[in-house]
Every structure is written in structure tokens, then in C-alpha cells.
Amino acid sequence: DSNNDLAACRMLLSELEAHQDAWPFLSPVRHKSVPGYRKVIKKPMDFSTIKEKLTNNLYLNLETFIIDVNLVFDNCQKFNEDDSEIGRAGHRMRRFFDKRWTELL
Ligand SMILES: Cc1ncccc1N[C@H]1CCCS(=O)(=O)C1
């Protein structure tokens, strides 16, 4: 039900934030220092923004939360080469997240 969905979202987010490869995703990409980012990425998302939305009760259920987490990783894949520090971190974080939330099912 929505209470344990919320608990699951909080649990999953704290695990994402604690991951050693989370550093590129903890705060919004500073588009002033990342040329092209604002033009290329139409819907920026990061873990701190997700936390804010959780706190403000903006996720209807686990599914809407997972959509935002996937947006973080999809943005990363769109902007970063697979063979780059941030690109590789994104792939590792997505693999970790997919494993964890499926373990909840
Ligand atoms: C996820 C991402 N995609 C593209 C460019 C940059 C980033 N992340 C930045 C977030 C702030 C710190 S940083 O500037 O080192 C890295």
C-alpha cells in the first residue's frame, strides 16, 4: 500500500545516495559549468531533487518514483560517453538500482 511504497522509496534512495558511484548524481548538474547540458537534457533529475519530491509527497507510488530514478540514468547515458568516468558510474548505479528494487517485488 502507499505507506510501504513510501518506506521502500526512502530505503532505495538512501541506498543510492550511499553508493560509492553516486557522486555524479547527488546534486543537480551545474549547467553553467557543463556546456550543452541545458540544451540536450530536457528533464534534468538528480538524487537531491528526488529526495525533495519524496519529502513533499510528490510521488504517487513506487512506479512514479522509479520513473524519476530512471530519468537520472537515462540523462546520464544520453549526455556521457559509455566509456567515461560519469558514463560508467551511471551504468553501475542503474545496475545496482534495478537489482535492489526488483528484490522488493
Ligand atoms: C551526471 C552528470 N552528467 C553530465 C555532466 C555532469 C554530471 N554530473 C555532475 C554533477 C555535479 C558534480 S560534477 O560536476 O562533478 C558531475
Image (spheres, rainbow, N blue to C red):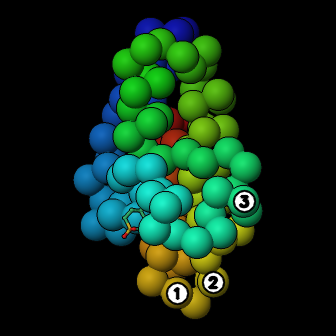
The residue lying toward the viewer, choosing from 90 and 4, is 90
* N-terminal label among 1 and 3: 3
Q: Is mark 3 within 8 Å of ligand 1?
A: no
Q: Which quarter of the rendered picture does the C terminus lie within?
A: top right
> Which residue lies under the disc numbered 1?
84
Mark linked to residue 81 = 2
> Which residue occupies 65% across, 29% down?
63
For discs 1 and 3, the disc positioned in front in the rendered view: 3
- The image shows residue 38 at horizontal and vertical percentages of 64, 57
Question: How crowded is the residue under tag 3: few (<14 C-alpha within 10 Å), some, or many (20+)?
Answer: few
As displayed, is residue 72 above or below residue 86?
A: above
> Would you name the residue on which mark 3 appears?
39
For badge 2, the amino acid type reads: Glu
**97 and 104: which is toward the camera:** 97
Decide: marks 3, 2 in contact (CB < 8 A)? Answer: no
Q: Is residue 77 visible?
A: no
| Secondary structure type for disc 3 | helix
Q: Residue 26: horizontal and vertical position, in percent? A: 36, 52
Say which residue appears at 64% left-offset and 28% top-offset. Answer: 64
**How far apart, in angstroms, are the residues tagged by discs 3 and 2?**
17 Å
| Percent coordinates x, y for residue 31 in the rendering | 52, 59
Q: Position of residue 58 (x, y in %)?
A: 54, 16
Q: Are marks 1 and 3 in contact (CB under 8 Å)?
A: no
In the structure shown, which secondary structural element does the residue marked by tag 2 occupy? loop
